[in-house]
Amino acid sequence: MNHEMKDPVYVTDSLIAEDIDAYLLKHQHKTMLRFITCGSVDDGKSTLIGRLLYDSKMIFEDQLASLENDSKAVGTQGGEIDFALLVDGLAAEREQGITIDVAYRFFATDKRKFIVADTPGHEQYTRNMVTGASTADLAVILIDARQGVLTQTRRHSYLVNLLGIRNVVLAVNKMDLVDYSAERFYEIVADYSHFAKQIGMDSFLPIPISGLKGDNIVSHSDNMHWYQGPTLLGHLEEAPVSDTQMLDHPFRMAVQWVNRPNLDFRGFAGQIGAGTVRPGDAIRVLPSGKTTTVKSIVTQDGDLDLAIAGQSVTLTFADEIDCSRGDVIVQSDQPCEVADQFEATLVWMAEQEMLPGRPYLLKIGTQTVTATVTEPKYEVNVNTLEHLASKTLGLNAIGVVNISTDRPIPFEAYAQNPDLGGFILIDRMTNATVAAGMIHFALRRSQNIHWQALDVNREAHAALKNQKPAVVWFTGLSGSGKSTIANIVEKKLHALGKHSFLLDGDNIRHGLNRDLGFTDADRVENIRRVGEVARLMTDAGLIVLTAFISPFRSERQMVRDLMAPGEFVEVFVDTPLEVAEARDVKGLYKKARSGQLKNFTGIDSPYEQPQNAELTVNTVALTPEEAAERIVQYVLREMS
Amino acid sequence: MNSQSVIHTGGQAATLTHLQRLEAESIQIMREVVATADNPVMLYSVGKDSACMLHLAKKAFYPAPPPFPLLHVDTTWKFRAMYELRDRAARDAGMELIIHHNPEAMEKGINPFDHGSLHTDMWKTDGLKQALSKFNFDVAFGGARRDEEKSRAKERVFSFRSANHRWDPKNQRPELWKLYNTRKGKGESIRVFPLSNWTELDIWQYIHLENIDIVPLYFSEPRPVVERDGLLIMVDDERFPLREGEVPTMRSVRFRTLGCYPLTGAVESSARTLPEVIQEMLLTTTSERQGRAIDHDQSASMEKKKQEGYF
């Protein structure tokens, strides 16, 4: 093999050739460290990872041959081996010379197996970095010795700290390009210390390196005798892993799956998030609070006497108590909190911006609940750490919000236990993962608001009116005829002796919702309030008619979910845009077309047609009178 | 009790070994699928990775048998020894085994000798899509590992496929902590890779420690082979058309990966036991996939194949 590189310093263990059984025995007891490297392309991140793979003999001859060819063809090292080419994966990014996603790399030494999350450094890839950091035990923050602490260094450090990584290595790279200057190194370390203190980072380990030349990577550099600390790989081999850090925490396990192969066995399967468990331990199931003791820890290899954080196990209980997926099993005398309102930091990960008030799915531990998010208390400028006022969060934005869930959930602060404090938000319509969140604490009011048990309940209200309450929800374009038809429906119901009430733009927008405009976020809040009012009215036993464009499926679904099953009747007033625009009763389409009116549904704001409306009335085929009659017949038939 | 389950608490703080941590992660992934999927299936290709995955599935759901069937998308051109192990492994696990043959490929007699890459496209890529659609499987476990190839290094553990089974590498969901978003739209499906973070060495070590049954072809033995286009191909049955002048010779060979026998290159070896295989692997100097004809043409070809639906 003819290449310019020094021979790998990590020589293959001689045991492999001499005594493979002894080698295997030794390697059974290896531990595993997951780490993330942060830095932009220019900091030499890919080169460093390529170097680690190369020096730990993870590159095979055929790969090396193809690497040498590629280096000559597209390399940036003047024909010498370009380690970055080993690491950059997807075809498009190889051409652009940048890494645009999270890639996972593997290498191993005699002591440890390593998984490296390699993520891009630019600001537009904040979400990728957060993703990579979420599973890391340790972070390596790269700095170009010529550049010193840059804006991006601050951003990376802030994110690493936000994700709760306690082991941070500051790798001052390209020392070869600053003549291996101790003075330059210490200058950078001093700068960084100052900044680390600002963001609350307790400690970090600075190491001067050259990824390209191999200084202080595997062995101590001959060029930097002034540096006495560990080499990069030496430190990676010794740093503690995060499971170990959770061992002293009280026992926590979120139940993933209930195992019931037959009537005699009922086991609760999950991965232990914190602490340890032994048969006989007193435990509590949250949120119910029921207690029992652990009868056995079942695995295919036999029952265990002890299981620890990080293990996937199946527990059986001494008593038959209710416990299902989403519940959290905790040490009985040290339970975690249960609440339904929290303050949390959100990292927004979707192109579509956050909509305060829109219901999202929140997955935490092993359960998924519905949650709404308030407007941000503030957004964080990840470059300057300034707090900014903001009404929403866009792609890659980070902010602090309040979250409320539709039911109480067991949790812990992320800083104490990431396993029960980290969550994701999922859009209910697109199913995309739109945000990652970290719980700070429960809001006090969530523990103090209790439902007033009312003596005159909704059944009593409805019985007095001799009717079944309902919400008849008209949706359709502006000018489709919603209000006209709803009015006729109400007259007919009134004539039949039914108690009803019509909510429309006129009586809502001018009063309750006069603070709201027509942005997407305001439209969501508009519909949320209308939904809540409608629900109160159904509690009062009324048949509620609502006439709002309500353009988004998510919000209509949210209102549907607010109501008792069967009490929500979605009526799609189906009028083609051309027809509605031709009618233009209020002259609004004309204004919208001329640009005087912004965010007008159908013109520059979308209308999402219902997919499963209870009723669709086509106003081209039917007169308003005919349409109203159909709706009344439906209500009388279904609501009696 | 075997060595995997023992936690060493003496002296310093207990730490799981790398294999214990990988095992726990794979089990967590499998349970998450079973708790959220409507109709999951495990793709079983009879190779060492499949053997590992099946072993982990047994552990994940013990004492119940794994609550999903095994699916083998067969090409009719696998090694005979693979068919033997396949049937035995499914029976031992107490799992249903579904075998799918692409009827179109069957009818046209598609084979690796006459049809080149069409063989893989039709039997494997199309066959897999057909089987998933036919049985309405919404989640399929696969044994792919991120260390196998560069484009796999970026694939998620839960990897989404559109209603026509395509993968969109630019539009993958972020995957944080161990919170997998398992939601999908109508017609969409998910490929789940519980072995994502395992390396080839991890797989071998685990097979060794756990005594997992694998196809004997991984061990060296005298076998009839011919040398063709730089690969040593085993003449496994009478369907093998010998070219002029080709005479199968008995050589001590073994296989580092297993696929269709006419497409899988053997290596000359004296490794007859698992430790010897691992030893050879550690001392070897060529990467695993080189024995397969599929991704030799260009380095980005695997990414292309995957976008089209190849596992």
Image: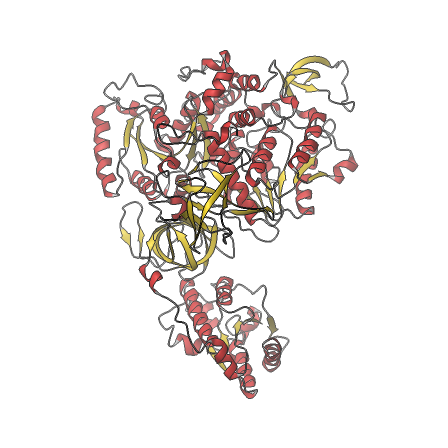
Picture layout, residue A359 above or below residue A303 = below
Left or right of residue A482, residue B132 in this image = right
Name the quadrant containing residue B11.
top left
Viewer-nearest residue: A330 or B272? A330
Residue B67 visible, this angle: yes
Left or right of residue B119, residue A533 in this image = left
Colour scheme in use: secondary structure
Viewer-nearest residue: B29 or A494? B29
Percent position (x, y) of residue A634?
61, 76
Percent position (x, y) of residue A626?
62, 81
Name the quadrant containing residue A207.
top left
Residue B157 visible, this angle: no
Viewer-nearest residue: A329 or B268? A329
Percent position (x, y) of residue A575?
57, 71
Picture layout, residue A109 above or below residue A319 = above
Name the quadrant containing residue B122.
top right
Picture layout, residue A49 above or below residue A475 = above
Left or right of residue A165, residue A615 in this image = right
How many marks do you count on the picture?
Answer: 0
Q: Residue at x 38, y 44 (%)?
A: A418
Picture layout, residue A292 above or below residue A490 = above
Q: Residue at x 68, y 43 (%)?
A: B131
Percent position (x, y) of residue B280?
55, 17
Q: Residue furthest top?
A: A18
Q: Quadrant of the C terminus of chain A?
A: bottom right
